[in-house]
Image (cartoon, rainbow, N blue to C red):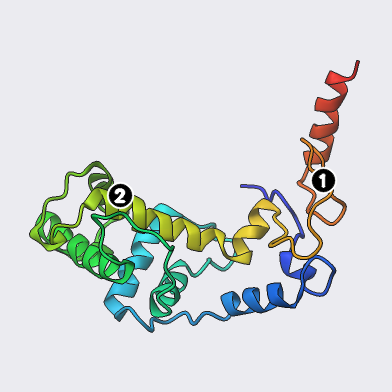
Amino acid sequence: MPDRYPGYDVLAKRHTPSWNEQTRRVIDRRLAVPRTPRFLSDHEFATVQAIAAEVVPQPVHRPPVPVAALIDAKLLDDIQDGFRAADMPRQRTAWLRGLQALDAEAQAAHGAAFRALTAERRCDLLLQMKQGALKHDSWGGMSPVNFFKQRLLHDIVEAYWSHPTAWNEIGWGGPASPRGYVRMGYDERDPWEAAEAHGDADAASRKNRHVG
């Protein structure tokens, strides 16, 4: 897949008016997250890595976003969303129970831990979780469907797109503090925003078709 924003690095904004000191501190902490588990066990951490590989497969041409490490850090600091469904346990309990249950389902179906399965079998189990087809006692009354939607999918996707490496893929400039944005209309781009390869020409062509 061609690079949509060749040469773009969001971290080049670090010492520009786009970011203030608070923004820099937040991003620095995110970049410094240890790549080894501090809350999860080694096995649980590897299981999250295996799940993330199916949910947000990453390109091979650049270092991966450390999704499992970001989730581990969220659990370690117990950073919660401020809300949860009444039938779901707190996020630490939900994650630990969900990982245990997923391993139990993998063992029952294929005789191996989830992390040891082929990609096809991993995807199949995750699809069954989404559809509510998993029934192992290890779920302990927690809905597999709700765990999939409200914790697993939510936290993995959030972790991925919270990282500057992912921002480079979509040309995003990171938090717009304090500069903000000026050109807010369709097909408009501020000069300090990333330019998509061939994007400006395509935009000009669309505008020309609507002139008059």
Exactly how many numbered labels are in the figure? 2
Q: Give the secondary structure at mark 2.
A: helix
In the picture shown, does residue 156 fall above or below 80? above
Dot 1, crowdedness within 10 Å: few (<14), some or many (≥20)? some
Q: How far across and down, in percent of the image, does residue 121 sit?
A: 25, 51
Q: Which residue is pictured at 79% across the width and 43% down the height?
A: 184
Please determine whether, in this image, residue 207 is positioned above or below residue 143.
Answer: above
Q: Secondary structure at mark 1?
A: loop
The amino acid sitting under disc 1 is Arg
Label 2, label 1: how far apart the Cα atoms are: 38 Å
The disc placed on residue 123 is 2
Cβ–Cβ below 8 Å for labels 2 and 1?
A: no
| Residue 32 placement (x, y as % from top left) | 57, 81
Q: Nearer the viewer, residue 184 or 137?
A: 184
- Residue visible at 60% across and 59% down in the picture: 166
Instruction: Give the left or right position of residue 137, taking residue 206 as reference.
Output: left
Q: Give me the residue at 62% from left, 64% from top.
A: 165
Pick the front one: 173 or 150: 150
Q: Nearer the viewer, residue 35 or 212?
A: 212
Quadrant of residue 84 in the image? Answer: bottom left
* Residue denoted by label 1: 189
